[in-house]
Amino acid sequence: MKNKKTIFLILFFLTISIFALKISRIYVEANSCVGCGDCVLVCPVDAIQLIDGKAVIDANVCIECEICLKSCTYNAIRKSK
Ligand code: SF4
Ligand code: SF4
């Protein structure tokens, strides 16, 4: 009985952790980003900020619509598999 409770608690916390650690597949290749800000303007959920002249995507806000990916003429925004 005690073992079942322990296993349930472990599974419960693992599930919570997986949802808490949302990882976006959209990312910025910093070496290619020139800081033009075009992606910041097109993001519908304001998930992109310019930090030190480079675009940074907040994975917790990004909905992976890929609009920024198409807007970047420097091919600095990529999608991981
Ligand atoms: S559009 Fe591309 S080059 Fe311009 S800030 Fe965004 S990621 Fe950088
Ligand atoms: S994929 Fe969409 S939501 Fe995510 S950063 Fe780009 S424009 Fe914003």
Image: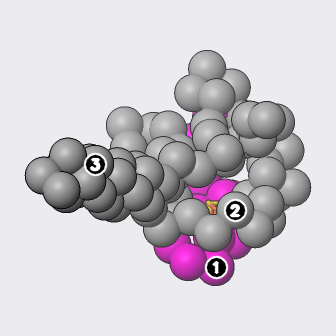
- x 79%, y 52%: residue: 69
In the drawing, does residue 53 fall left or right of residue 40?
A: left
- Mark 2 residue type: Glu
Q: Position of residue 45 (x, y in %)?
A: 56, 77
For badge 3, the amino acid type reads Ile
**How dense is the environment of label 2, judged by Cα within 10 Å: few (below 14), some, or many (20 and up)?**
some
User: What range is drawn magenta here?
Assistant: 33-46
Q: Which residue is tagged 2?
A: 64
Nearest to N terminus: mark 1 or mark 2 = 1
* Residue 65, quarter of the rendered image: bottom right
Q: Nearer the viewer, mark 3 or mark 1?
A: 3
Identify residue for label 3.
7
**Coloring scheme of the render?**
one colour
Majority secondary structure of the magenta segment? Answer: loop
N-term-proximal mark, 3 vs 1? 3
Question: What distance separates the C-alpha of mark 3 from that of mark 1?
Answer: 41 Å
Quadrant of residue 66 within the rendered picture: bottom right
Quadrant occupied by the C terminus: top right
Which residue occupies 84% across, 44% down? 73
Q: Position of residue 57 (x, y in %)?
A: 51, 51
